Image: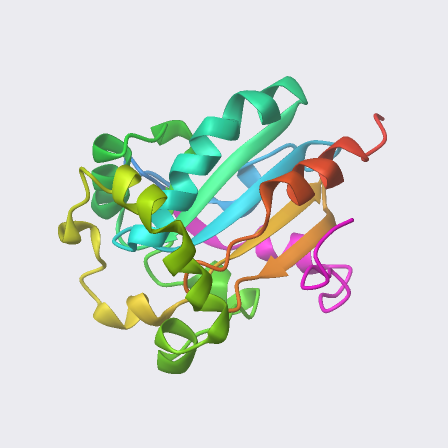
């Protein structure tokens, strides 16, 4: 059963259509629209909005997503990771973690984050109780950040106060939505996978 923090009821039925008009960037620097990321008819996509490319907890999440990619691929699910920062910051994460560049996108102006009303602010980033669980994963964090560089942090430092979230779409239908309550408060991937597997095949 999905986490009680996960709910798509806070979004209007047209959320995917409106989100689709937002422009983001491939890690290679090419602009494209959100609606071009997956098949808008029946395609199933998991969209992970990372905090920013210089966040160690996001390196941890990206590593977990990379390890789970074959599982999602086998289920016919497209895995998409978006982060705050310019495309060159995305490339730093992709090269040093490493992470597949064809799954990684940059949203330097946080347009998708603002549209989806993801949490933002100093208190959420540093003092939210949900962030405390990061301490329980210290060894895992240390392992995945061995090639970490602070240079991946957005040049516009206000981006470091952005929180992320996890979303599952089938075509233009939003199936799952979960906002991160604080830094490192990521959606359980088993929950996300369960949602994907329960989607009836068209």
Q: Nearer the viewer, residue 74 or 45?
A: 74
The answer to whether residue 15 is magenta is yes
**Total numbered badges shown on the rendered structure:** 0
Q: Position of residue 168 (x, y in %)?
A: 66, 45
Q: Nearer the viewer, residue 113 or 145?
A: 145
| Residue sitting at the far top | 74
Quadrant containing the C terminus is: top right
Query: What residue span does the magenta drawing correspond to?
Result: 1-25
Q: Position of residue 98 (x, y in %)?
A: 28, 30
Image quarter of residue 51: bottom left
Q: Position of residue 179 (x, y in %)?
A: 57, 63
Q: Does any portion of residue 149 appear in the rendered image?
A: yes
Q: Position of residue 85 (x, y in %)?
A: 29, 55
Q: Residue at x 85, y 31 (%)?
A: 200
Q: Residue at x 43, y 74 (%)?
A: 120
Image quarter of residue 28: top left
Q: Residue at x 70, y 51 (%)?
A: 176
User: Does residue 189 appear to the left or right of 126 in the view shown?
Assistant: right
Q: Nearer the viewer, residue 154 or 138?
A: 138
User: Does residue 34 appear to the left or right of 132 in the view shown?
Assistant: right
Magenta part, dominant SS: loop
Q: Residue at x 21, y 34 (%)?
A: 96
Q: Does any portion of residue 29 appear in the rendered image?
A: no
Q: Is residue 37 above or below residue 83?
A: above
């Amino acid at each position: 059963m999905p986490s009680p923090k996960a709910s798509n009821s806070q979004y209007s039925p047209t959320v995917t259509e409106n989100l689709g008009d937002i422009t983001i960037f491939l890690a290679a620097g090419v602009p494209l629209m959100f609606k071009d990321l997956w098949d808008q008819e029946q395609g199933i996509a998991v969209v992970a909005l990372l905090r920013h490319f210089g966040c160690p907890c996001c390196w941890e999440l990206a590593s977990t997503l990379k390890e789970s990619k074959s599982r999602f691929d086998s289920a016919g699910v497209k895995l998409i990771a978006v982060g705050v920062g310019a495309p060159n910051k995305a490339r730093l994460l992709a090269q040093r973690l490493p992470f597949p560049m064809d799954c990684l996108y940059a949203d330097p102006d946080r347009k998708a984050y603002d549209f989806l009303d993801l949490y933002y602010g100093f208190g959420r980033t540093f003092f939210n109780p949900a962030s405390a669980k990061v301490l329980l994963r210290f060894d895992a964090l240390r392992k995945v950040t061995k090639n970490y560089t602070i240079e991946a942090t957005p040049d516009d430092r206000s981006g470091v106060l952005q929180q992320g979230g996890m979303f599952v779409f089938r075509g233009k239908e939003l199936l799952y939505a979960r906002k991160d309550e604080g830094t490192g408060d990521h959606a359980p991937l088993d929950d996300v996978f369960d949602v994907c597997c329960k989607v009836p095949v068209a």
